[in-house]
């Protein structure tokens, strides 16, 4: 099987007032954003680049409700790349404020002294966040989430 694929969750555009209040085929709406996910083999950096090619960024998460919505999109809760990045402080690739987080217990921790500047969601039974190296992790199924 292809269980070592990465799941790519993408939110690429906002629905402005002029747009119809629904997302295009294959996309799922939460609030004013559209999300989709793809199974793919990409590092965090490649995933962000892919999101940008679709007009967005890896997803930023700003509320418990939004986090639960993303979790429902990632059926089976595989590990999922989201847009958090530590460049000295945590920020989102879409430039929005890092005003919400769901770190797992003991995270972020730069495990074993290794810098882990990227965020994956769906860690552990509570499906929280973990800081991780940004390279492709073979054997993990990861989702990339993009939004504007």
Image: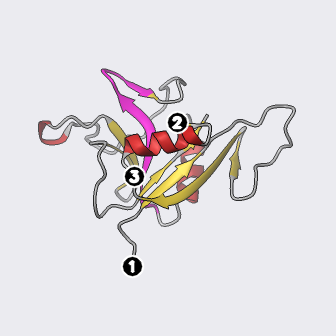
Badge 3 marks a residue whose secondary structure is loop
> Is 20 left, or right, of 29 in this rendering?
right
> Is 23 left, or right, of 4 in this rendering?
right
Residue 140 horizontal/vertical position (percent): 33, 61
Residue 99 horizontal/vertical position (percent): 49, 26
Q: Residues within 10 Å of mark 1 (few under 14, many from 20)?
A: few
Tell me if residue 117 comes above or below residue 76 in the rendering.
above
Between residue 127 and residue 131, name the one nearer to us: 131
Secondary structure mostly seen in the magenta stretch: strand
Q: Which mark is residue 1?
A: 1
Farthest residue toward the left? 112
The residue segment tinted magenta is: 77-91
Q: Residues within 10 Å of mark 2 (few under 14, many from 20)?
A: many
Mark 3, residue position:
42
Residue at the spot 84% in from the left edge and 38% down from the top edge: 19
Badge 1 marks a residue whose secondary structure is loop
> Is 93 left, or right, of 130 in this rendering?
right
Residue at the spot 57% in from the left edge and 47% down from the top edge: 10
Farthest residue toward the front? 53
Locate the N terminus and report the quarter of the image it occupies.
bottom left
Specify whether residue 48 is in view.
Answer: yes
Residue at the spot 58% in from the left edge and 58% down from the top edge: 73
Specify whether residue 64 is in view.
Answer: no
């Amino acid at each position: 099987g292809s269980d070592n694929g990465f799941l790519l969750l993408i939110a690429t555009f906002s629905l402005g007032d002029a747009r119809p209040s629904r997302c295009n085929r294959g996309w799922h709406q939460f609030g004013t954003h559209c999300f989709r996910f793809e199974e793919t083999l990409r590092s965090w950096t490649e995933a962000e680049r892919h999101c940008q090619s679709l007009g967005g960024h890896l997803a930023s998460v700003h509320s418990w409700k939004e986090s639960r919505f993303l979790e429902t999109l990632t059926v089976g809760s595989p590990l999922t790349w989201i847009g958090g990045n530590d460049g000295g402080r945590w920020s989102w690739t879409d430039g929005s404020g890092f005003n919400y987080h769901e770190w797992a217990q003991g995270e972020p921790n730069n495990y074993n002294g290794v810098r882990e500047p990227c965020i994956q969601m769906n860690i552990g039974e509570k499906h929280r966040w973990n800081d991780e190296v940004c390279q492709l992790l073979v054997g993990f199924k990861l989702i990339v989430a993009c939004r504007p």
